[in-house]
Image (spheres, rainbow, N blue to C red):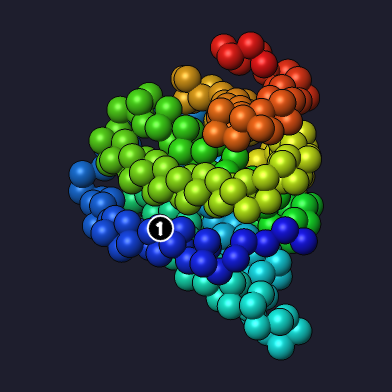
Amino acid sequence: MLDLPIERLRPIVTSFNEIADSSNWNRFSSIPSEEVLPDLLSEGQKEAIAFCTVVEDHTPRYIEDYRRRFPIDAAQDIARSLSNRELFHFLVRWGAEEDRHAQALAYYQVQSGIVENQEALEEELIRENIKDFDLGFTQPVQVFTYTFLQEKATQIYYQSLSRAVKEPILKRLLLHLSRDESRHFSFFVDMLDAFVECHNTRVLPLIVEVASHYRMPLFNTMPDYARKAVRMAREAPGYSRKKPLEILADWVLGWAEKLPENAREFREASREIRERNHLSPSVAGV
C-alpha cells in the first residue's frame, strides 16, 4: 500500500482548508426566489440541473467510501491513523461543500418551479442516495486519481453550462459550484504530485488503471444514466467528458520534465492513457 507521510500530507490539507475557510457562499441567500426568472430556463437546462442534483446528492455515500478506505481506529497503527485523521480535516470540509452543492441545486429546483413538491424531490433523491457506491479501486493514489478526474469534469461542466444559461440566479449558482470544484481539483493535483514525489514511477500503473476504467459516479446505478448524460452534455457547449483524461495525461507528461531520469516511463504512461481513451496525441509528440 502506497501512503503519504504525515509531514507531506499535512501542508496539503492545511493549504486547502486555509483557502476554503475564506471561500464561503450561502446556499440559500444566493438563490433569492423573487429574483429567479424561470421562463428563461429551457427544458434541457431543467433536466441538466435535476441530473446534477442527483449526482451531488450522493455525497453521504462518497464520504462513507472514503471513511472505509481511510479509517481511524484501533485496527490501524498510530502512524496510519494519524495520517487518516489529517485527511479527515479535508474530508469533512470537502463533504460539507459537496453537500452544499446538492442542497443548493435542490433548493433552486424548488424556487424556480422545476419541481413543485419538495417532499417528492427529496424522496426521489433518497431512493438514489441509499444505493451503494464503490470506486472499485484499492490504492489511495487511485482514489485521488479518480477524484482528480471527477472534480475536473464537474468544474468544466458547471462552467460550460453557466455560459449557456440565461437565467441569472442559476448562472450565479453554477459559478459558485465551479469555483468550489476548481479548489477541490487543485487539492487532488497536489495529492498526486505528492505521491509522485514520494513513490516516483511506482504510481504510474495505478494511475493508468484508473484512467482506463474511469466512469462518472452513478453511471451503473442511476436509471437511464446514458441517455441523461448525453442530454446534459448537449446543454453545455464546450463540455467534453474526455477533457479530464486529457488533463491527466498532460499532468503525467509534465513529470517527464521534472524527473528526466524517469522521463521515458512518464511519457509511456501518458501515451497509454491517451491510447486507451482514444485521445489525440499530445502536442509534445507522445
**Residue 57 image-quadrant placement:** bottom right
> Which image quadrant for residue 279?
top right
What amino acid is labelled 1 in the image?
Phe
In the image, taking residue 229 as reference, residue 104 lies left or right, namely: left
| Rendered residue at 40%/32% (across/down) | 159
Q: Residue at x 78, y 40 (%)?
A: 205
Q: Position of residue 48 (x, y in %)?
A: 51, 36
Q: Is residue 197 left or right of residue 65?
A: left
Relative side of 152 to 143, left or right: left
Measuring from the top left, give residue 137's x and y in whole percent.
77, 52
- Give the camera-side residue of 262 and 275: 262
Q: Residues within 10 Å of mark 1 (few under 14, many from 20)?
A: many
Q: Which residue is mark 1?
A: 16
Q: Judging from the image, what secondary structure is the residue with disc 1 in?
A: helix
Q: Quadrant of residue 226?
A: top right
Q: Specify the quadrant that holds the N terminus.
A: bottom right
Report whether residue 279 is seen.
Answer: yes
Please identify the residue farthest to the bottom as the structure is shown: 74
Residue drawn where x is 52% and y is 72% of the image: 86
Residue 153 placed where, x, y %?
54, 36
**Position of the C terminus by quadrant:** top right
Whether residue 46 is visible = no
Residue situated in front as seen by the camera: 221 or 67: 67
On screen, 134 above or below 223? below
Q: Residue at x 66, y 28 (%)?
A: 263
- Outermost residue, left direction? 34
Number of numbered callouts drawn? 1
Residue 82, x across and y down, in percent? 58, 78
